[in-house]
Amino acid sequence: MSYLFRYYAKVYDRFMSRFHLDDDSIILDIIGIGNKKIADIGGGTGRTGDKLIKKGHSVTIIDPSRSMTIRAKKRNKKIRVINRSMPFDMKEEYDVILFRDCLHHIRKQRETLELCSNKLRKDGLIIIADFSPESIKSKIIFCFERLCFEKIYEVDEKKLLKLLQSFDLNTKLIRINHRDFIVIGRKNR
């Protein structure tokens, strides 16, 4: 279990807000309103999940940190929680599988993304928002996480695009700023 997320769960949302790491507006715009079935991998305290539920979606947070997901359930009782680490054999299919600032914590990224691509419904999306390893600000974030005994597996956005394409997903890169990017993979079959 992660030291970082177990012990910082109480202050996590304030920390994210203080350092301007909590903007999920582009992700919310991409998903839109409606009735999509969403898996929020690493959804933690449920900030984004809560907003998605208020837009009419059903959300399952898949996150190994119970101290984080307890806060998610307090935030919105409709959030479903699976306390597991990726990858694991997900039983359900989803319209959207979201990785927000968490793929760099997953060691088996290829296996995880392949599994997720197989669990997408037709026209489903994998949305990956993460930190570019080339950015100085990202390097500072990764250094802080490593100081908190967290293992980091940096995610290069160009390699990520190629990886998702190898799973027959149509891809798109959105560069938010030098630090942040979003990669989208769409399943067309």
Image (spheres, helix red, strand yellow):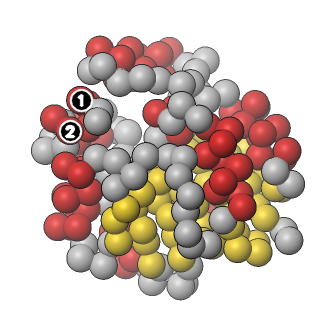
Query: Residue drawn 78% across and 39% down?
Result: 163
| Secondary structure of residue under mark 1 | helix
Whole-percent x, y for residue 146 in the image: 36, 17
Disc 2: which residue: 6
Q: Distance between the Cα atoms at labels 2 and 1?
A: 5 Å
Q: Is residue 10 above or below residue 184?
A: above
Query: Residue drawn 29% across and 14% down?
Result: 147
Whole-percent x, y for residue 139 in the image: 47, 16
Answer with left or right where residue 150 lies relative to residue 176.
left
Whole-percent x, y for residue 64 in the image: 34, 48
Assess disc 1: are there few (<14), some (14-19) or many (≥20) residues with their C-alpha within 10 Å of its C-alpha: few
Answer with left or right where residue 22 lies relative to residue 134.
left
Q: Quadrant of residue 156?
A: top right
| Secondary structure of residue under mark 2 | helix
| Residue 40, disc | none
Answer with left or right where residue 107 lies relative to residue 66.
right
Amino acid under disc 1:
Tyr
Query: Residue drawn 24% across and 76% down?
Result: 77
Query: Residue drawn 61% across and 29% down?
Result: 155
Could one spot residue 83 in this view of the protein? yes
Q: Is residue 22 above or below residue 83?
A: above
Disc 1: which residue: 3
- Tell me, yes or no, whether the two marked residues, 2 and 1, touch with CB atoms within 8 Å: yes
Where the C terminus falls, by quadrant?
A: bottom right
Whole-percent x, y for residue 38 in the image: 52, 70
Q: Quadrant of residue 161?
A: top right
Assess disc 2: are there few (<14), some (14-19) or many (≥20) residues with their C-alpha within 10 Å of its C-alpha: some
Amino acid under disc 2:
Arg
